[in-house]
Image: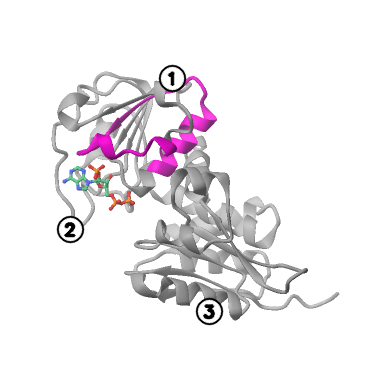
Amino acid sequence: MTAILPRSFGVFGDPVAHSRSPIMHAAAFAALSLPHCYLPFHVSAGRLGEAVRGAAALGFGGVNLTVPHKQAALALCDHRSDTAERVGAVNTLRFVPNLDTGAIEIHGHNTDARGFLDALDELDGPPLRRATILGAGGASLAIADALLGAHPELELTWVSRRPEHIPSLALANATERVRRCNWQELGTPRGELLVNTTIVGLAGGPEAFPVDIELDQLEPRARVIDIVYPRPSGGLLDRAVAAGLTVQDGLPMLLWQGVRALELWLELVIPDHAVEAMRTALYS
Ligand code: ATR
């Protein structure tokens, strides 16, 4: 049997020290008996180009990108996936040798979108007909794109302090199914899914939404997801549990975007036991 050569992977961000991705990917490599490593790299906004080209030159297998690089990385990519193009953000880079030219091409993907759907699939709930997304930052674009693409009948209410800034590209050609509104126009959320993508509840972020969010008009067994992790106490998810709804914090989405990135890099389906090793590492 030929030995598998070790390869390097990592995450570029600023800040990056708090990232759980290194521990998650280390667990995957161990579960798959691979000799690879995955490290956090502190890369400031002005140095992303140098860092990405350096990683390509050093033979990295791939990197993840986190704040503040997801949008800026688009311009560095030789190829972008359709999802990355629509969402306007890249969280996973692959370095692909071009056998004709010898150059190393940079391929940009967005696994946040698929990761959200995978995480959503872990929760039982009524079929999705109406959903509400709170906030219109980068993460919300991936979530909206994923939901609209996967659920052709879904009607989406999307709340932002500045709804006019929600880019139409992110609507997956579904503008007629999306109501963009500000917080005062929101009213009481209805339907089967409510997703908080804002920084409300995050340590150091605002403590409360701009208006009270009532949960009593959501369908029975509706799913309420807050992509903040770990779950803040006393916030939206605690109220949703008290209302008998099904809840999830941001860790499953983090897990599944990582699984999908790994699949792109290793070009294999990640087996269940490796996914569970990644989950255990994330929750440790
Ligand atoms: P990310 O890219 O991870 O979504 P971001 O771009 O920093 O992060 O966005 C932060 C999120 O918090 C956005 O959804 C933002 O919503 P807007 O669409 O209104 O900009 C939201 N946000 C930030 N401060 C907020 C506040 N005080 N009240 C409500 N939402 C807030």
Whole-angstrom CA distance, mark 3 to mark 2, is 34 Å
Q: Is residue 73 found inside the magenta-colored segment of the image? A: no
Instruction: Please state, as top left, top right, bottom left or bottom right, where the C terminus lies in the image.
Output: bottom left
Q: Is residue 58 left or right of residue 222?
A: right
User: Relative to 41, is 106 above or below?
Assistant: above
**Residue 194: % across, % down:** 33, 31
Residue 70: horizontal and vertical position, in percent?
42, 58
Label placed on residue 129 = 1
Q: Earlier in the sequence, mark 2 or mark 1?
A: 1
Q: Identify the residue at horizontal 48%, vertical 69% (top origin).
A: 22
Residue 251 on image: x %, y %? 41, 51
Q: Quick check: is the Cβ at mark 1 less than 8 Å away from ligand 1?
A: no
Task: Point out the stretch of residues depicted in magenta.
Answer: 141-169
Q: Is residue 272 left or right of residue 179?
A: right
Would you name the residue on which mark 2 appears? 204
The secondary element bearing badge 3 is classed as helix
Could you tell whether 114 is left or right of 202 in the image? right
Quarter placement of the N terminus: bottom right
Which residue is identified by label 3?
54
Q: Is residue 68 above or below residue 192?
A: below
Dividing the picture into quadrants, the one containing residue 208 is top left
How crowded pointer 2 is (Cα within 10 Å; few <14, some 14-19, many 20+) is rated as few
Mark 3 or 2 closer to N-term?
3
Which residue is depicted at the point 40% across and 21% down?
176
Name the residue located 39 percent from the left edge and 75 percent from the top edge.
47
Q: Earlier in the sequence, mark 3 or mark 1?
A: 3
Given residues 71 and 66, the one toward you in this image is 71
Amino acid type of disc 2?
Answer: Gly
Ligand 1 under 8 Å from disc 2 Cβ: no
**Which residue is more in the foreground, 284 or 158?**
158
Name the residue type under label 3.
Answer: Gly
Give the residue displayed 73% in from the left and 71% down from the top.
Answer: 101
